[in-house]
Amino acid sequence: MGIFDFLSNDVAIDLGTANTLIFVKGKGIVLNEPSIVAFDRNTKKIIALGNEAKEMQGREHREIRVSRPMRDGVIADFEIAEGMIRAFIKKVNTGSFSSRRIIIAVPSGVTEVEKRAVRDAAEHAGAKEVHLIAEPMAAAIGIGIEVDAPVGSMIIDIGGGTTEIAVIALSGIVNEESIRIAGDEMNNAIMQFFKKNYNLLIGERTAEAIKCEVGSAVPLKEEITIQVKGRDLVGGIPKTAEVSSVEIRDALNENISQIVEAVKQTLERTPPELSADILDRGVMITGGGALLKGLDERIRMETNLPVHVAEDPLTAVVRGAGKAIENINKYSKVFIRKRTY
């Protein structure tokens, strides 16, 4: 591979609230790491990112700040996000970074200002041409749906910051619902639950681990009990609490109900012909939230529709964005167009 092959390497990025995934044309997915950056508070110099920064989360001293520059699916800290994009790209590619195309997946509900911020961050990181694609559209392409067909498909993409629900047909989104309730909010609900019921303060990483281990949307065949370590809010000393999966399910219930409600609202606004297609083909769930135990069953019970969890739901969006970069002419219709004023 010569230097010119490196120069023309096109890249697709799923710039997620929880994880950043990068797909390089001709190589496939080359990076999947947490969207977390550790930097020096005084110089703003990045010390660590991704998995390395996640290890530091909640354990940093006053000179170091560990930050997540993405919140609710969009850039919350522009300077740090730009540094993160640049560092991740550098990590996957030792070659120069000019004349390159980048496709970035963003939530379907982003504002014009938020789109501009993403474009600017990519351009400052060295991209010459930036295309944006809506996450549910990328997820649909990633799981093999023919998005240009005159047939309706429904995608529910549950990430870290947003849940995206979209009905797709003829290379476009017919209707959509983008709510800022997803993995992060569920972690938050678990943290609040421990504070309120056990006077126990736990960190974000612990909440995430509890959600993955025992979180569920419907009763489990065998309910589980786990030990949770944290800091006692009253005594201020470390302590352990024993909780069951039933309690965690109750803590998550409000967020799950809001996601189900958003799915129902999207279905109510769907034209009848497309509703018939969805009844035949079912609903696909992608994103990290798809891995929550029993979520597909809960949506199935409340909508009476067939619901399927996509294969490898965590990488669906970046795989779709990657397909789009490998066949840019075929998929150019699905990109988010720049608004002309």
Image (spheres, rainbow, N blue to C red):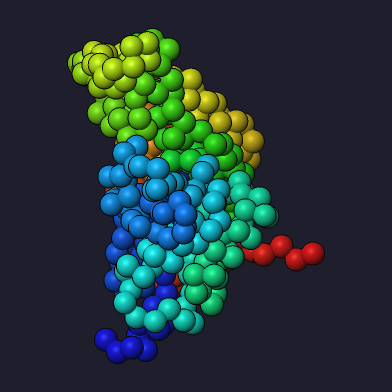
Seen as rendered, the residue at the extreme right is 341
Asked which quadrant contains residue 123, the reply is bottom right
226, above or below 17, in the image: above
Residue closest to the eye, 36 or 284: 36
- Residue at the spot x=23%, y=13% of the render? 242
Quadrant in the picture for the N terminus? bottom left
Q: How many marks?
A: 0
- Residues 79 and 306: in front is 79
Along the line of sight, the residue nearer the viewer: 233 or 36? 233
In the visual, does 154 lie left or right of 49? right
Residue 272: x %, y % from top left: 61, 38
Residue 227: quarter of image:
top left
Is residue 221 placed above or below 178 in the rendered structure?
above
Above or below, 301 against 44 in this view is above
**Residue at 28 percent of width and 52 percent of height:** 52
Q: Quadrant of the C terminus?
A: bottom right
Q: Is residue 192 among what the camera can see?
A: yes
Q: Percent x, y for residue 334?
A: 55, 62
- Residue 244 visible in the displayed image: no
Residue at image location 37% in from the left, 63% down from the top? 88
Residue 317 location, x and y as percent? 41, 53
Task: Pinpoint residue 145: horizontal percent, then vertical percent.
Answer: 42, 54
Looking at the rendering, which quadrant does residue 45 occupy?
bottom left
| Residue at figure coordinates x 52%, y 66% from the top left | 122
